[in-house]
Image (spheres, rainbow, N blue to C red):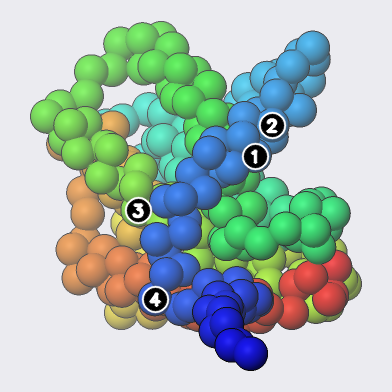
Amino acid sequence: MQTASIDQDELIIEAGRLEKNYWADLWRYRELFLTLAWRDIAVRYKQTIVGIAWAIVRPFLTMVIFTVIFSRVARLPSDGGAPYALMVFAAMLPWSLFSTALGEASNSLIGNDRLITKVYFPRLIIPAATVVSAFVDFLISFIMLLGLMGYYRFSPGWNVLLLPLFLLLALLASIGPGLWATALTVKYRDFRYVIPFLVQFGLYVSPVGFSTNVIPDNWLLLYSLNPMVGVIDGFRWCIQGGHSSVYWPSFVLSMVIVGLFLWLGINQFRKMEKTFADLV
């Protein structure tokens, strides 16, 4: 009696892909990223005027309050001859992008718990998708800035061509802390109440309502440990042209901090990613 030899294929089931394939998976799951991003935008703006109105009212009221307090009451100087309201609103653009992206990302995994527990995909896609809705808010506010520049008859210089670069820096500045906050919020739910406080505190210690020029020179480098200092100064420099200046050592230090937070955020997120399905 002859025994037939049958070759059998082994089926190996592994949790996720190998580390080297993780970043390639981000591209493979790009359709999921676009779907989540579009869903966030639709939820915020579809059949409602509150979302659009909030994107307009919040930076506008903040600009008015800061202009009155810092310009009229405290009598702080503007950058060069630029109108104080324009100087404040130019800073509100990157700050609103940063704060909105950070706030949305910190709760993104908890809000998608059913998706996380059912299928595999790089979890990094979820907080990254929330940045798109923050970017839409930025575009709405940018239209307001153009109207404000028209009201003051203020024309930008060639510096405005570099605005996309500083926009990218603003996005990177928000992604690093956003990933860190996202991972910590999954493990420690009370952390989601800490984020709004930190964002509110950061608004007042960042050069949004005032110019960096009012900071004493001997404190400037220490102050630039706040990564948003370089981003905000860069935005003003692009929009206000010769009316604004950038202290480049301070700017370089802020960019180093942005890179450090981005690296730490990605590492913290990747370290905790395997436990997300159990914690949410």
Q: Quadrant of the N terminus?
A: bottom right
Q: CA distance from mark 4 to mark 1?
A: 24 Å
Q: Earlier in the sequence, mark 1 or mark 3?
A: 1
Please identify, in this view, whether the residue under mark 4 or under mark 3 is nearer the observer.
4
The amino acid pointed to by label 2 is Arg
The reply to whether the C-beta atoms of the residues labelled 1 and 2 are less than 8 Å apart is yes
Q: Secondary structure at mark 3?
A: helix
Q: Residues within 10 Å of mark 1 (few under 14, many from 20)?
A: many
The amino acid pointed to by label 1 is Leu
Q: Which residue is mark 3?
A: 169
Q: Secondary structure at mark 1?
A: helix
Please identify, in this view, whether the residue under mark 4 or under mark 1 is nearer the observer.
4
Q: Is residue 116 left or right of residue 135?
A: right
Q: Which residue is mark 1?
A: 36
Looking at this view, name the residue that lies furthest to the left.
158
Q: Secondary structure at mark 2?
A: helix
Looking at this view, name the residue that lies furthest to the front.
1
Q: CA distance from mark 3 to mark 2?
A: 25 Å
The amino acid pointed to by label 4 is Lys
Q: Which residue is mark 2?
A: 39
Q: Residues within 10 Å of mark 2 (few under 14, many from 20)?
A: some
Determine the image quadrant of residue 58. Answer: top right
Toward the viewer: 16 or 280?
16
Q: Secondary structure at mark 4?
A: helix
What is the x, y in percent for residue 251?
26, 64
